[in-house]
Amino acid sequence: MSPTALADKQNAEAHESVNLTKSQLIYFSSVSENTKRFVDKLEMNAARIPVFATEPPLISAAPYVLLIPTYGGERGKHSIVPQIMKFLRYDENRVNLRGVIGAGNTNFGEYYCIAAKRIAQKCNVPVLYTFELMGTSEDVLKVKEGLETFWTPASPNWQER
Ligand SMILES: Cc1cc2nc3c(=O)[nH]c(=O)nc-3n(C[C@H](O)[C@H](O)[C@H](O)COP(=O)(O)O)c2cc1C
């Protein structure tokens, strides 16, 4: 574990104010809340990664799918926002990750949803779906149905990794 990760973890444990979740869907949405609007339309239990450092860290206690937007810097650099980086520094949040859904904007060309793609690659899990901004009604339906299939008890995603 890196020194920064260790410091975050120790800090969280010292304050004992972590937010444990068994949600199968965990998402990040900035103050513009496009992604939150999409997640609300799914009508599923979902946990939001804290936007502000003053909020207690979110720790996953069960397998989950991560749904996140991309905020790219120059040529895809720093495309994963610090809040998501901090979230993924917790071992539990990496161990329980089963797949990633990306939100973005195709105007960004080859960097469309690059944050989701990079996390999926790094954590060796699939990119399950990508959509633009707050998604269309078709996106909502596809993600809703896709997640239901993904989480059926027969699915290997239930198994311990
Ligand atoms: C400064 C900025 C940079 C962005 N960079 C990318 C990008 O590199 N790739 C991409 O697909 N979308 C990019 N987007 C689009 C966002 O991912 C999209 O607006 C998303 O819906 C934001 O979600 P949120 O409102 O929940 O935070 C960017 C948006 C902004 C404002």
Image (cartoon, rainbow, N blue to C red):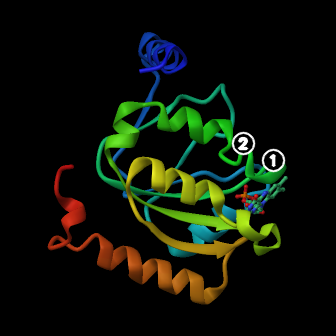
> x%, y% of residue 153?
17, 70
**Which picture quadrant has residue 155?**
bottom left
Instruction: Compare residues 101 and 23 and report the one nearer the observer.
Output: 101
At label 2, which amino acid type do we have?
Answer: His
The answer to whether 78 appears left or right of 159 in the picture is right
Q: Are marks 2 and 1 in contact (CB under 8 Å)?
A: yes
> x%, y% of residue 52?
69, 33
At label 1, which amino acid type do we have?
Answer: Gly
The answer to whether 63 appears left or right of 54 in the picture is left
> x%, y% of residue 127?
47, 66
- Which residue is painted at 60% across and 51% down in the image? 28
Going from the N terminus, do you reach mark 2 or mark 1 first? Answer: 1
Which residue position holds label 1? Answer: 73
Which image quadrant shows ligand 1?
Answer: bottom right
> x%, y% of residue 55?
61, 30
- Which residue is painted at 28% across and 69% down in the image? 151
**Which picture quadrant has residue 51?**
top right
The answer to whether 133 appears left or right of 47 in the picture is right
Which residue position holds label 2? Answer: 78
Residue 82 seen anywhere in this rendered image of the structure: yes
